[in-house]
Structure formats: C-alpha cells, structure tokens
C-alpha cells in the first residue's frame, strides 16, 4: 500500500513508503526494479528529506489502516541516505499518528499532522523531542514552502 515516494540525493534510487509493509521499498531508478527493503515502523507513511539532503524522516503512522482510533504506536524514523540505514526512531509519548507534513525552512522542525489523534506534531530534528498541538478533527497533511515560486505536485509537498 504505497503512500509516498522520494528520490535519493544522487537521483539513482527511489524510496517508497508502504503503509502495509511497515517500511520502505528501494527502487533502482535506471532499472525500475525493487532492490531492497528497510523496515521502519508501523504504517510507514510520509517521507521528508532533511534540508541538507543527508537524511530522510519517515512518518510511521502507528497503524496499517486507512481509518483507525487514536493512540497508536506512531513514530518518526531517521534514515541516513549515505548508509541507507535507520539511525534512530523517535516514538510519540503516549501514542500518536504522524501522517504527512514537511520540514521547516530552517530545517530545525519536522511538522506532521496527526490524523487519528487530532494533533499537529512538531519534532525537533536534532533531538527528536516532540511537541503535540491539539487541533480539530482529522488533520491530513501540512505543507511548508521552503522557497517562493515553488509549486506542489501533490498534497505531500513534492516540490519542483
């Protein structure tokens, strides 16, 4: 159940978040063939490169379902592009459902909607500390525009 896709900094590999598989499929861009899989967390959903292009934040929704109840085991995994390995995973204390969002212009905050929990999450990209902000029903995606004049190719903020 693919949810999001991002390309590696060198343009050779696609990372595809699959909510049912709980991780990322790696697809060779030249051969258009699956070349690997990285387990990340329950309900891998949104993918967001760091502003310096060295890391990828993976929102793990805490559920494999399209609709679910609050309090799942939501988290954010941090992948190092160079090694293609998960270096850490930041859980949401008390549970949560990080969905879609983006990285702040200065790269210091990862903003994610919390669809099942009626929250917006703000993760410190250095420490992984998370702030939860209560909002109305089922927020689904946040977009942060890093550069004026850029347009989104999708509601997850694929910019060109």
Image: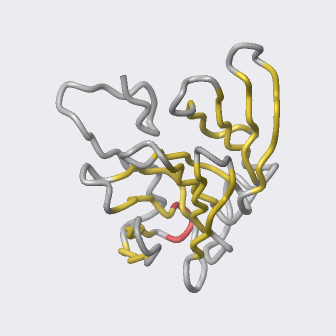
Q: Residue at x 53, y 49 (%)?
A: 56
Judge by depth and name the residue closer to the eye, 1 or 137: 1
Q: Position of residue 43 (x, y in %)?
A: 71, 56
Direction bottom: furthest residue = 94
| Quadrant location of the C terminus in the rendered image | top left
Q: Is residue 62 above or below residue 144?
A: below
Q: Position of residue 91 (x, y in %)?
A: 59, 75
Q: Is residue 74 above or below residue 61?
A: below
Q: Position of residue 8 (x, y in %)?
A: 57, 33
Q: Residue at x 67, y 73 (%)?
A: 72
Judge by depth and name the residue closer to the eye, 61 or 37: 37
Decide if residue 120 is in sight here: no
**Occupied quadrant, residue 24:** top right
Judge by depth and name the residue closer to the eye, 43 or 28: 28
Report the side of 151 relative to 140 (left or right).
left
Decide if residue 8 is in sight here: yes
Q: Is residue 150 above or below residue 67?
A: above
Direction top: furthest residue = 30
Q: Residue at x 43, y 51 (%)?
A: 101
| Quadrant location of the N terminus in the rendered image | top right
Q: Position of residue 70 (x, y in %)?
A: 61, 74
- The type of colouring in the image is secondary structure
């Amino acid at each position: 159940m693919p949810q999001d896709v991002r390309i590696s900094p060198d343009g050779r590999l696609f990372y595809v978040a699959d909510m049912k598989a709980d991780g990322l499929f790696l697809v060779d861009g030249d051969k258009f063939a699956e070349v690997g899989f990285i387990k990340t967390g329950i309900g891998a959903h949104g993918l967001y490169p760091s502003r310096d292009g060295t890391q990828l934040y993976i929102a793990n929704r805490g559920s494999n379902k399209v609709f679910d109840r609050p309090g799942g085991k939501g988290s954010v995994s941090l992948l190092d592009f160079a090694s293609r390995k998960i270096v850490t995973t930041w859980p949401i204390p008390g549970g949560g459902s990080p969905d879609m969002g983006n990285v702040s212009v200065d790269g210091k905050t990862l903003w994610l909607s919390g669809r099942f929990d009626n929250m917006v999450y703000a993760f410190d990209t250095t420490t992984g500390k998370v702030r939860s902000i209560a909002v109305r029903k089922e927020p689904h995606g946040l977009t942060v525009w890093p550069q004026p004049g850029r347009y989104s190719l999708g509601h997850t903020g694929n910019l060109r």
